[in-house]
Amino acid sequence: MSITASQARKELFPLIKKVNENHEAIEIVSKHGNAVLVSAEDYMALREGSYLLRSPANARRLLKAYENALSHINVSERELIDPESPDAGAGAGAA
C-alpha cells in the first residue's frame, strides 16, 4: 500500500493500528523522499534478520540449518510423556 504524506498525517493512528494488525508495510510518498511505516515488532524482526545474516559464515550456517530442518535430517519422532504417569521420570537421564 502506498499513500501520500498528507494522507498519512490525517490517518496516522488508524495506520499505526493497521500495520500492527496486518503486519504489512505502508509506503509514504513525499516530494521530500519516501518512507515506510511498519510495526515495531516487524521492524525489530527485520533488524534481527539483518544482524544474523550480516556475517557470510553465519548466513551459511543458518541456511544449512534451515535446509536440514526442511529435509528432516537428524529428526526423529517421539511420543510425549505423561507427567502424571508413575514412570514419567524413568526416561533418559534416570539412573
Image: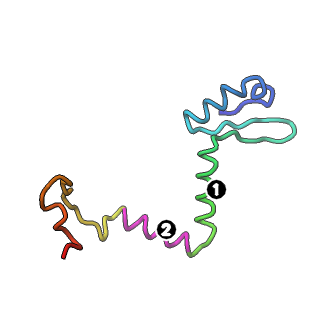
Looking at the rendered structure, which numbered label has been put on residue 8? none
Would you say 39 lies left or right of 85 here? right
Q: Is residue 53 above or below residue 10?
A: below
- Residue 4 location (% of width, % of height): 77, 30
Q: Residue furthest top?
A: 10
Residue 38 position within the rendered picture, expressed as x and y whole percent measured from the top left = 65, 41
Vertical comparison of 75 with 1: above or below: below
User: Could you tell me which residue is drawn at 62 percent across and 30 percent down?
Assistant: 17
Q: Label 2 belongs to which residue?
A: 62
Q: Residue furthest right?
A: 32
Q: Residue at x 17, y 60 (%)?
A: 88
Tell me where residue 70 appears, x and y as whole percent: 36, 61
- SS label for mark 2: helix
Chief secondary structure of the magenta portion? helix
Q: Magenta part of the protein: which range?
A: 58-69
- Tell me the quarter of the image containing the N terminus: top right
Residue 92 spot, x, y in % from top left: 21, 71
Tag on residue 47? 1
